[in-house]
Amino acid sequence: MLTDVAVRKAAPKESPYKLSDSQGLYLLVKPNGTKLWRLKYRFGGKEKALSFGAYPEVSLINARRARESAREELRSGQDPSLTRQQKRAEAVRTDNQFRTVALAWIAAHGKQWTPQHRSEVQSTLERFAFPKIGSLPLDAITPPIALDVVHCIEKKQAGETARRVRQRMGAIFAYGIACGLGTSNPAEQIKGALAPLQKGQQPAIIHLEPLRRMMRRIEHTPSHPVTQLALRFLALTAVRSGEVRGMLWTELEDDVWIIPSERMKMRREHIVPLSTQARAIIEIIRPLTGRGPLVFPNTRWAHKPMSENAMGYLINRAGYAGQHVPHGFRASFSSIMNERRPEDRMIIDLMLAHVPKDAVEAAYNRAQHIDRRKQISQEWADLLLKDAMPSRDLLQTVRRSASY
């Protein structure tokens, strides 16, 4: 029997030749390199040949399916040549391919989603699933093939994304089964094979374009201006949300923000270089909150920090509940900037106030590398806020009740 490798590597010769598969199916290789599927059979005492199309447009698995269909007609007393066009269509069908079924699933269910969610669902499939399995018929996708899709995502340290893609693949297979286009759901079978999420891992958007879309959506979501400015400042600095909520005016020194050790999770002073966009936010909010001790105070009581839920609720109202949380900006910054600057991994870790893994890194971190950190901070701000509205315009955001 033939294999995909043998079919693919079959080279042309001076004369046409055949490569036999089984039960009359063979591949005819012509001198010009064309590879044609043929089925040899007998009907009414005469030897006949039936064409199923050319490789690779017609894969080996689809050619075999066409052969079995033709043999079924022979067993029922019919000449498959009479339905030759139908057989060819069956061999090259695309309606059962994963990409086609996925787009049909999105069309069927997407009407109930927000435009942003629909775009995010389709973009993750186009990025992670379609390149690997988009052209495969549903029943050609085995559990190991499906697992390879999500494992490749996990290798990029995107465990939450891997889970979402697996869930969406499962829904697509279920939809295909209901439509008669498949018979099994390999995405459900691999559920237990995914690596467990690390403790404390939270939803985060870790690709630049979807992150920008979310920021633009947030900008047009009704909220208090202080909450809007705080969330943008959080995204720019990639610190923990509690550090922004408790930020004091006295902690600012020129173009850096020095967070004292008592306010840091690891009880070590942390220096945060401020990009021009972050410094602009400070100057914009100063007339609003500069008379009190806190940069981003509670909208009701100026002497109290902002509610720990204020920024999270804003993200949720923008339509990203379960997809991103305030803490997720740290993962966004880490994923995007480590991909762009793999040589600066230790500096990026320093900017996130991560604990050094060994003495060598600890010595490296003590050097601070402020100038390099300022460069990375500015690059991140320019990337994140490309085409975003000016921070001053956030003051015009339609206000909601100050209860949050």
Image (tube, grey):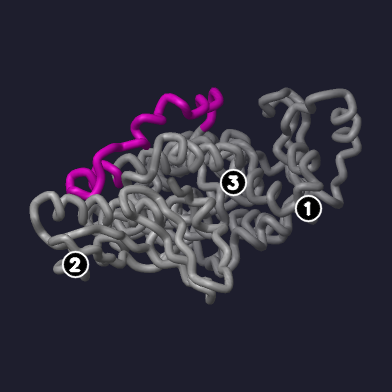
Residue beneath disc 1: 255
The verdict on residue 182 being magenta is: yes
In terms of sequence position, does the residue under pointer 1 or pointer 2 come before the other?
A: 2
Q: Which mark is residue 81?
A: 2
Assess whether mark 2 and mark 1 are in contact (beta carbons under 8 angstroms): no
Residue 123: image location, x then y, percent: 44, 57
Residue 243: image location, x then y, percent: 62, 35
Front position among marks 1 and 2:
2
10 Å neighbourhood of mark 1: few (<14), some, or many (≥20)?
some
Distance between mark 2 and mark 3 Cα atoms: 59 Å
Residue 150: image location, x then y, percent: 49, 39
| Vertical relation: 91 (above or below) 121 | below
Quadrant assignment for the N terminus: top left
Q: Quadrant of residue 239?
A: top right
Residue beneath disc 3: 332
In terms of sequence position, does the residue under pointer 2 or pointer 3 come before the other?
A: 2
